[in-house]
């Protein structure tokens, strides 16, 4: 309400300005604009130069004060072309914002000599250039050249004359060399130089800049820290992740009394966590994942009053999980996966009220039954990942277990015995369940179909038997997926490793549960009975994997109701009959297999079905597909004639595939984009083992 009001006021004010201000253009400014436009490939809408008395002050993107241009904001205008030298006659210009365009040319040197310029935002263009050694803009406040193709070194004299600069953003370019000391940047608050090719030590002078609050150095090639000198730094965010830092983490956190984020994942830091960090009162988010750190974990929660997120995954920490972590009163997200930790979940975790996300995968923990009994007392636990622990223990069937807030439960790759327990029935919020790669026996319980938010179910690679419960074809969030399902906030990503039997495979990274493709994976079990035609209800399902079971009967043509399906694998079963013609209407089908069944007849060679290779169909002695000779076509035709007549839904498959694509494209466009960015590459390379960490 309030922002809208402000917006309204703002618009009114603009309106008033436009109506009253009949100021003519200063002729210097007008000449400047003409030259400026000349550099671009197309004219700027609304800028008309043929009228000598034109009031350029009313043109789109221009603001004047006292008849002189003070602001040019042509951000997001799809401009392409060069910035021309002739443009810069704007003695009064304070803001030049050309961000989010396709501007290519080099930067005219004069741009760095505008006495009044306060904001220079050329981010997200395609400018290739090197910067001059000094930038002479005495009033400069914000300099944003990020996401271009700048190369060479970052000018060391940046602040010599531009001493008032507050924000410098140079991220996502090709800058190399070391980071300058920036000693003259006394008012600098933000320095973003992430995603470049900077190397060497991180200079200590940066920590002496009195106002610096945010320092983003991630994704470069820094190898170490120069130290901190004798200063105390007011930094609030320090991100040095994805560099080549080696050696110990400096024990200097007592000199950062305001530090809230320390993000140093994906380096090669070794040794332990320094004492001053273990006792930092200010720090709220510590991310040391994917380094070579070792020793015991000894965070001191009575000092660390602000800690909310701690990611120590993928290191060499050893010993037990320290019980005192539960006394970090604000700690919500804890990742200890992939370390050398052993033992049990401490009893004290019963009182871990703030805990919302816990990953312990790939450790050597034991006593799953006790672990679950303890963790069920955490009232806010919403994501629990325990993969690769508790080797060969039994999945507890204790009816009293209750996890009211749990949204994701992952206990994969533990070789657990037992059956799928009935306490899962009480996980009413569950969205994601992965119990794959265990030795679970018995049937798949029907109540799983009642979990109204469940959209990702992986029970693959167990010894489950019996029929597929029909209730799975009624899963509400696979029928009409409510995209607004409340998302647990993850402070760090989920990893799901797609491993095959020979290789290590590839780790897929998901920043939120919602990023997972809606899936049902029941592959590699002992399931019998039919594939229900009601699976066609699941309009939002992306992956249905039923391979390596003993399923029988025919493939229902109604499965083509799964309009979002991308992966459909029914290979290695005992299926009979033909491949339904209706499948040619599935617009997103990109991985498909019916290999090694008893199918017969002709595979329709239209739609996506025409795009699959032999391996999708082989192992069916009476099935024919693609590039056949006349003789084999005749044989296939005969086989086809032996088949029962097509069912009703086989007949109405003839409506336009194109129309289908368009309709579906609109309906699920967002999802499909997300999925194709995050997921499809992984699925395509997918293979046998799936495990979370
Ligand atoms: C200026 O150009 C526009 C179109 O470019 C045209 O419609 C208009 O008549 C011209 N005005 C003058 C005064 O030439
Ligand atoms: C420039 O314009 C973009 C898009 O309108 C805006 O997001 C950005 O904040 C502006 N830059 C500055 C420094 O104000
Ligand atoms: C833009 O700048 C590039 C690089 O200097 C140059 O090759 C090209 O000719 C220029 N294009 C125009 C339209 O001036
Ligand atoms: C700083 O500004 C002064 C006065 O305008 C000028 O003489 C000098 O060359 C500038 N220095 C740098 C490094 O740009
Ligand atoms: C740094 O970049 C410049 C300009 O692209 C290049 O000439 C130089 O070789 C690079 N230096 C290093 C050490 O990579
Ligand atoms: C800290 O360093 C500065 C400059 O390097 C120096 O002037 C100052 O005396 C030093 N302060 C202390 C307490 O060592
Ligand atoms: C830390 O923040 C407080 C409050 O914003 C400020 O007064 C103090 O100067 C900062 N400390 C340092 C070392 O900058
Ligand atoms: C730190 O950098 C990483 C990239 O390595 C980025 O994903 C993350 O958002 C950054 N975190 C903060 C708090 O700046
Ligand atoms: C772990 O860090 C290494 C560099 O030390 C990097 O190459 C790798 O991509 C990182 N892995 C993950 C999963 O972040
Ligand atoms: C990381 O550092 C350790 C020594 O601390 C070294 O043995 C190891 O090879 C390094 N790993 C990489 C990927 O550089
Ligand atoms: C803890 O965090 C809050 C909010 O982010 C902040 O205001 C407070 O100063 C922090 N406490 C310490 C001791 O830094
Ligand atoms: C298995 O993984 C390895 C290593 O990632 C890869 O080279 C190989 O092609 C994969 N095999 C299959 C069948 O996907």
Image (cartoon, grey):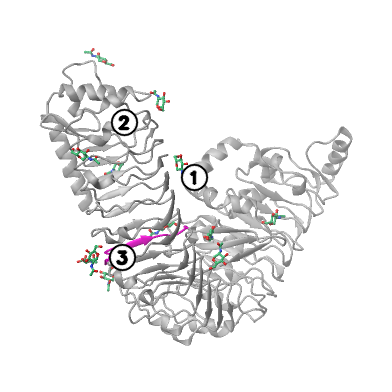
Question: Looking at the picture, does residue 4 appear above or below residue 654?
Answer: below
Q: Residue at x 48, y 77 (%)?
A: 403
Examine the residues drawn in magenta and state their main secondary structure. loop
Circles 1 and 2 in contact, beta carbons < 8 Å = no
Task: Tell whether circle 3 marks a residue whose Cβ is less than 8 angstroms from ligand 6.
Answer: yes
Along the horizontal axis of the image, is 631 left or right of 28? right
Name the mark nearer the viewer: 2 or 3. Answer: 3
Circles 2 and 3 in contact, beta carbons < 8 Å = no
| Label 2 SS | loop
Position of residue 408 measured from the top left corner of the image (x, y, whole percent) = 51, 68
| Label 3 SS | loop
Given residues 384 and 300, the one toward you in this image is: 300
- Neighbour class for label 3 at 10 Å: few (<14), some, many (≥20)? few
Q: CA distance from mark 2 to mark 3?
A: 38 Å
Q: Which label sits on residue 108?
A: 2
Q: Which residue is mark 1?
A: 669
Is residue 238 part of the magenta span, yes or no?
A: yes
Bounds of the magenta segment: 231-243
- Neighbour class for label 2 at 10 Å: few (<14), some, many (≥20)? some
Given residues 589 and 268, the one toward you in this image is: 268
Residue 661 in view of the camera:
yes
Position of residue 129 measured from the top left corner of the image (x, y, whole percent) = 39, 36
């Amino acid at each position: 309400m309030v922002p809208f009001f402000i917006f309204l006021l703002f618009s009114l004010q603009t309106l008033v300005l436009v109506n009253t201000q009949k100021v003519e253009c200063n002729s210097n400014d007008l000449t400047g604009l003409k030259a400026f436009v000349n550099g671009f490939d197309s004219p700027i809408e609304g800028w008309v130069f043929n009228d000598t008395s034109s009031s350029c002050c009313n043109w789109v993107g221009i603001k004047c004060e006292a008849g002189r241009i003070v602001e040019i904001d042509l951000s997001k205008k799809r401009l392409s072309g060069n910035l021309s030298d002739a443009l810069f006659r704007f003695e009064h210009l304070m803001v030049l914002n050309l961000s989010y365009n396709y501007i290519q040319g080099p930067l005219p040197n004069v741009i760095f000599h505008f006495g009044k310029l306060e904001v220079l935002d050329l981010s997200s263009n395609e400018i290739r250039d090197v910067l001059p050694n000094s930038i002479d803009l005495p009033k400069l406040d914000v300099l944003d050249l990020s996401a271009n193709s700048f190369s060479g070194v970052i000018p060391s004299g940046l602040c010599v004359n531009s001493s008032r600069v507050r924000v410098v953003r140079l991220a996502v370019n090709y800058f190399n060399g070391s980071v300058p000391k920036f000693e003259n940047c006394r008012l600098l608050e933000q320095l973003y130089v992430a995603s470049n090719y900077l190397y060497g030590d991180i200079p200590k002078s940066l920590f002496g800049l009195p106002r610096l609050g945010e320092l983003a150095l991630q994704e470069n090639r820094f190898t170490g820290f120069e130290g901190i000198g004798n200063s105390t730094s007011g930094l609030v965010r320090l991100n040095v992740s994805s560099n080549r830092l080696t050696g110990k983490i400096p024990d200097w956190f007592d000199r950062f009394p305001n530090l809230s984020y320390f993000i140093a994942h994906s380096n090669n830091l070794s040794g332990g966590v320094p004492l001053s960090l273990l006792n930092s009162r200010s720090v709220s988010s510590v991310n040391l994942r994917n380094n070579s750190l070792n020793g015991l974990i000894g965070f001191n929660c009575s000092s660390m009053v602000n800690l909310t997120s701690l990611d120590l995954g993928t290191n060499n920490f050893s010993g037990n999980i320290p019980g005192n972590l539960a006394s970090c009163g604000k700690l919500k997200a804890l990742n200890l996966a992939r370390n050398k930790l052993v033992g049990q979940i401490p009893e004290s975790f019963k009182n871990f009220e703030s805990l919302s996300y816990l990953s312990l995968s790939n450790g050597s923990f034991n006593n799953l039954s006790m672990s679950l009994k303890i963790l069920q007392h955490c009232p806010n636990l919403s994501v629990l990942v325990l993969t690769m622990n508790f080797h060969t223990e039994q999945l507890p069937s204790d009816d009293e277990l209750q996890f009211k807030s749990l949204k994701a439960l992952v206990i994969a790759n533990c070789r657990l015995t037992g059956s799928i327990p009935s306490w899962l029935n009480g996980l009413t919020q569950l969205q994601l369940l992965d119990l794959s790669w265990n030795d679970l026996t018995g049937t798949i319980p029907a109540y799983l179909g009642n979990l109204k938010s469940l959209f990702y179910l992986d029970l693959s690679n167990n010894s489950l038997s019996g029929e597929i419960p029909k209730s799975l074809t009624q899963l509400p969030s696979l029928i009409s997926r409510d995209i607004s399902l409340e998302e647990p906030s993850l402070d760090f990503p989920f990893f799901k490793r797609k491993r095959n039997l020979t290789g290590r495979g590839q780790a897929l990274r998901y920043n939120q549960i919602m990023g997972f493709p809606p899936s049902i994976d029941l592959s590699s079990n002992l399931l019998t009975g039919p594939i229900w035609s009601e699976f066609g209800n699941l309009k939002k399902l992306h992956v249905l994997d039923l391979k390596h079971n003993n399923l029988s009967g025919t493939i229902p043509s109604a499965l083509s109701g799964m309009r979002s399906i991308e992966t459909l694998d029914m290979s290695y079963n005992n299926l009979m009959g033909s491949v339904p013609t209706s499948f040619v209407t599935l617009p997103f089908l990109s991985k498909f297999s019916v290999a090694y069944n008893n199918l017969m007849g002709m595979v329709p060679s239209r739609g996506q079905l025409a795009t699959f290779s032999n391996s999708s169909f082989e192992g069916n002695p009476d099935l024919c597909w693609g590039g056949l000779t006349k003789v084999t076509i005749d044989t296939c035709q005969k086989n086809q004639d032996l088949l029962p007549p097509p069912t009703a839904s086989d007949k109405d498959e003839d409506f336009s595939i194109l129309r289908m694509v368009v309709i579906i494209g609109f309906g699920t466009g967002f999802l499909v984009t997300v999925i194709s960015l995050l997921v499809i590459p992984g699925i395509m390379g997918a293979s046998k083992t799936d495990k979370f960490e």
